[in-house]
Structure formats: structure tokens, C-alpha cells
Amino acid sequence: MQRLMEVLDKLGRPKVALVGDFMLDHYLYGDSERISPEAPVPILEVVNRESRPGGAASVAVNILALGGKVACVGIVGQDAAGEELLAILASAGAEISSLIRLPGRPTTVKERLIGLAQHRHRQQMLRVDQEARGAVPKEVLGTVRTLLRSAIRDCQCLALEDHDKGLFSDAATPQWIADARSAGVPVVVDPARVSDYRRYRGATMLTPNRFEAALASGIQITDEESLARCAQRLVTAADAEAVVITLDKEGAYLARRGERGTHIRTRQRTVYDVTGAGDAVLAMLAVAIGGGCDWEQAVALANLAGGLEVERFGVVPVSRDEIVDSLRGIVGLRSGKVVLRERLAEEVARRRAAGETVVFTNGCFDLLHMGHVRYLQRGREQGSCLIVAINSDDSARRLKGPGRPVIGQNERAEMLAALECVDYVTIFEEDTPEPLLKLLRPDVLVKGGSTGEIVGQQFVEGCGGKVMKMDLVEGLSTTEIINRILSNRDEK
């Protein structure tokens, strides 16, 4: 993982030419607490509206967030949605001069109705699509080819995202790929859910998910052997150099022509919403390959990008800084997880905006032991982000008495940061974490071994959050460990 951090640091700002189905996502958020008297359906009382880039447009903003540059090539409708989408892309920094405004064909819009209970716990209730899926006229595809030939002159990678909306024809797509390859530009393809990959022939790399791969190969993936056969069949069918089959929580499988495949594992994460995971994977692969990464490094980074994306609600770009922070957490570097409260407040705001559930717990965590670890693992299961706030040395001394803590605050923080279940660690000087709770406003407050009211309970519940009391491992505590050590010493 340290090596991947070094690779990211040297990536530079590769430019990607992106051809795909550019879409606009609309989100309608509201409270849904009643059933309609007119029909057995829930009522959504809209409180907020939001527009985000979708499809290839989502890939574009991900490329930019990952530090790359992007030239968008394709079509959008000559309508209000197309105008809005172009404005979003331009404001993000994408080149949009090669996006054709096509009269008579609507911009693809996906409108999602999101219900909340007490302004929390987002749940998609319905999706309404506005689109045209008929074949794009040949003369328009010819114009796309001309624009793409111009765009790839100063690009280091070509990314194709096919949602089967009529843009990627069996005749035109191989020409686009051949033009890029003849210019020495690698081509990464996120294929449509189709049974025939011949339209992608000559691509450098294809990135289907397990369901798309099974459909295109005719091989159901049930084990490593069937996975390997499936991947090699796709390499042959598309005459590609490599295929990366994404396997959600199981990582990804990289198969190269004529070589033994590699299963690249990933960290398991809490899945909040799979929307946009494929966009993040394609963007990271394009930036990594365009920046000169080898394929295994590129796939490992794409694993991380996809994993971060599923932890948030809706299509939200994954940044290069977030990839770095995730790598720091995996290798246990203190600077990645141990943060001051000001930075922590920013991180909590970002995660909450992405729809994540923030869990908070606190304690001294002196002489870290199995009981602590089990407690923190259970705490992490209550949401998608666990914050551990620890008493400073002075605070712990006031709470526990002389001789405590045994382990200093920095060492305690670093050990906690090394745990996979912990996302952030912060140190507080006060006698209680209440000021920190008021700053962060967590969704869930977890505390162990408490029979009375927990510090901050009224505040958290008053904000609509919940408080969980957890049993500790019986007979196992820092005090008991210290007493056992002293007893053994006295016996000697």
C-alpha cells in the first residue's frame, strides 16, 4: 500500500478523452411518513432538489477529482437538461467543446425520489427515466469520430462508457478504438450489459462487473476456475489485451492475454449505495493507466475508488486525496486517521453530505485489549464511519487518578488508528466529550459498560440521532489487567 501511495504521488495530471452516454441525475429529497389516501403508495413531501452528473458525465467529474484532465466527446440533447449538464461539466473543469447538441433527441435524465424519515435514513423510492435509446444517425457518429481524432492528439488515455443508449454502434466503436490505438493511446472500456463484445474489439482493457461478464461470456462465475475461464473468453472475444472483472466486495480479477490471471483483493466496506461505483472504477483506471501505472497498480487503485464510492449516497466523485487517506488508513499511518477536531468536523460534514452514517464513541482506551477491539468492531457495524475520541493524558489522569494512563495519548491514538474498523481518532482535553459531540453531531453515539445516562445522550437524541449502550467483555478491563500484573509481581 505504501507503494501505491508513491504511485499516486507521481501520477501527474494525465488527460483522458472520454466518449460515452452523458446523463443528468436529478434527486428529489423529502420526508416520507404517510401513505396516500388515493392509492397504497407513500407520499413524498419534497424538501430539497439536487442535480448531479450521471453516466459518462459522472466519469468525467471523477477523472477531474482524481487529478486528471478530461475532454468529453459525445452527444446531449438540445434541451434544458442538456444546458444544465453542460454547465455542471464546465464548472467542474471539463472540456465540453466536443459534446454535440442534437435536436430532437432528449438528454438522458434519471430522476430519483429519495424518502427520509425525520430527515435521516435515505431510501430510494422510485426512479423515473427520460431517454432515447434508438441508434444515433451515422452522420452524427462520423462527426463524433472526427472530434475524437482531434481530442486524442494530446490525451494519454481514451475511456469509453457504454450504457447502450444508441451511441456505441457495432460499426463506429471499433473505428474509435482503432484510431486511438494507432495514435499510441490506450483504450479502457466500461461495456454495456450486452451479450456480444465484438464492438469493443481491439481495446486495451475492458472492465465489466461480474453480471456483465457472465452475460457476455456465457459462463456463470461460481469459483476461481470459472472466473478465469470467463475472463479469458472475454479477452478473446474482444481481442483485448486485458479484462478486469469487478467483483464488488471480493475485489477484482485481472486477466491478460495468454497469462495467468490475478485476483486483486480489496477491503470490505459497508455498502450504502452502489450507484456510481463503475464510474469511479473506470475513472481511476483511465487516470492510472494514462499516468503510466502498471495494470496491477491501476486495478488496486480502482478497487479503492469503487469501494469509497459505495460508502456514500448517490453519485459523488471520489478525490485523489480520499484515495490517499484510504491508503494511509490501510497501512496504519497515523497522519491518515488521527486528526484535529477542526479537520474532523470537515470530514464529518463531507461524509454526511454523501449520505453516510457517522458513529461516535469515546474513552481512554489505555492498554488496548481484546475487549476494546470487539467493542469497536461492533460500534463500526452501526454505521459507515467510526470516530473514536480519546481522553488526553491530562484528561485521563483527572478521570482515572495518578498513574494513569499507562500508555501516552499519541501511542494510544496510533494503535487505535491501526484498527481497520476505526476511521478517525481525535484527542480531547476536556473532562467529557460533550463539546466534541456538539461540534460533530454524530448520527449514532455508542458507549459501553454504562448503566446510567450517557454523556451527550440528550443532545444526540435531541438532534434526531440514536444512542446505543453496549455490553463489555466480562472480566476484561484495563484496570483488571493492571491488577493482574501487580498481583503476579507480588507473588514472585
Image (tube, helix red, strand yellow):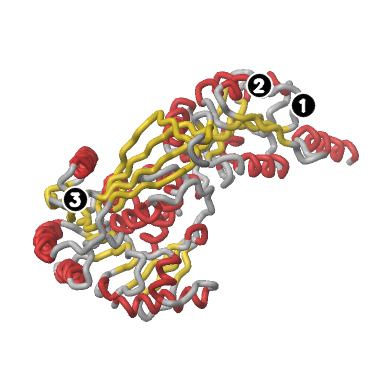
Q: Position of residue 91 (x, y in %)?
A: 21, 38
Vertically, is 415 above or below 147?
above
Q: Which residue is mark 3?
A: 76
309 with respect to 191 (left or right): right
Q: Which residue is mark 1?
A: 451
Q: Callout 1, which amino acid?
A: Thr
Residue 79 seen in this snapshot: yes
Identity of the residue drawn at 88% across and 36% down = 490
Identity of the residue drawn at 42% across and 59% down = 300
Residue 319 seen in this snapshot: no
Image-quadrant location for residue 449: top right
Residue farthest toward the right in the current orientation of the protein: 491
Per the rendering, the mark at residue 31 is none
Neighbourhood count class around disc 3 (C-alpha, 10 Å): few under 14, some 14–19, many 20 upward = many
In the rendered view of the protein, which quadrant contains the N terminus? bottom left
How many marks the image carries: the answer is 3
